[in-house]
Amino acid sequence: MRHVLKPNPFLTGKPGPLVVGHRGVPLLHQENTLAGFRRAVALGIPAIELDVRLTADGVPVLFHDALVDRLTGAAGAVAEMSWDQLSRLRIRREVPMGYDPNGSVVTIRYAREEPIARLDEVLAELGGKVAINVELKIALPRWWSALVGERTARALAEAGVDGSVIVSSFDPRRLLAARRAYPSLLVSFCYDDSTLDFTRPFLDRFTRAHTPQRLLEHVLGANYVGKLLGMRAVGADHTLIGPATVEALHRHGVAIGTHTLFPIGSTTGKSLSPKASTEEEVQRLVGLGVDWIESDDPERLMALVP
């Protein structure tokens, strides 16, 4: 019997958007931990998002922040610590999860401390059980290095999970490095609603017809970066997504995903849109036909997505 390969679950052609647990199930377990990803699988959540950084000795680990202080209470940068050093740390029970829309710090208390996970061990246990969005983080203080793309691609190749994985980043150089190391990878450039804020002085001086937001919507819909990098998918903040953007991307066979619905808090200092925590925003995105939606509360999102 002929074996038919299933399409990558992040691509277009599904009856509804793929629900993605943002950093796992952070309401129940610390972000980017094996415990959280195991819970996602147990709950039947079809996909997870995780963040990858490189240690000083080149080991891909799952960690969102450049510094370890918020999550572990220790001091130091992931990029300047060896895996041996990081493996001795624990993600603490009481974790600040950033600021809510009112500017108050949100803190969650978990049942137990958790170890920091390596990418290879997560892939070995969860590969084939759940779809995975692997985000390559910008490696402060070594922002110029794109090695994380190559090392992550190698880990994915060794695990043999590329058919159910997408590699995403806000830095195209890291995506190019991943594609060079593993050409069949599905990669996705990410857009934040503040990506083109540096253009504001120019726009204010020379024209009132556009704002950084509208300019970014145009760039996203035209998929300039995706064409340049040969991408079949893009990710974007939900505030950037409208019907014209989705229609334009789908017309060219490009999938579009969005982040982050039902957020716990903003760990980057960026203000949260009040719409992000509403069921109406979920229904709007479903109606537009987006291909995946990331959420800090994937259980709630699953109940709203067909």
Image: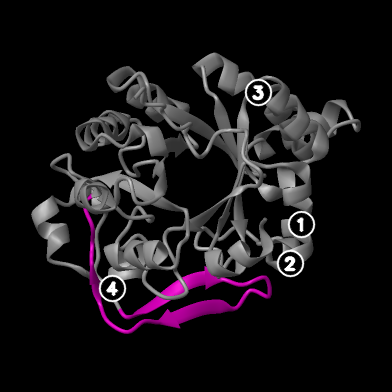
Which residue does the image show at 27% across and 28% down from the upper left? Answer: 150
Q: What amino acid is found at the position of numbered circle 4 in the picture?
A: Gly
Q: CA distance from mark 4 to mark 2?
A: 33 Å
Is the Cβ of the residue at disc 1 closer than 8 Å to that at disc 2?
no
Q: Earlier in the sequence, mark 1 or mark 2?
A: 2
Secondary structure at badge 3 equals: loop
Q: Is 269 left or right of 144, judged from the image as shown?
A: right
Q: Measure the C-alpha gap from mark 1 to mark 3.
A: 24 Å
Front residue (pair 46, 179): 46
Which element carries disc 4, helix, strand or loop? loop
Q: Which mark is residue 73?
A: 4
Q: Amino acid at mark 2?
A: Thr
Calculate the distance from the C-alpha at mark 3 to the C-alpha at mark 2.
28 Å
Q: Nearer the viewer, mark 4 or mark 3?
A: 3
- Mark 3 packing: few (<14 Cα in 10 Å), some, or many (20+)? many
User: Does residue 100 belong to the magenta stretch?
Assistant: yes
- What residue did someone put label 3 on? 223
Tag 1 residue:
283
Quarter of the image with the N terminus in it: top left
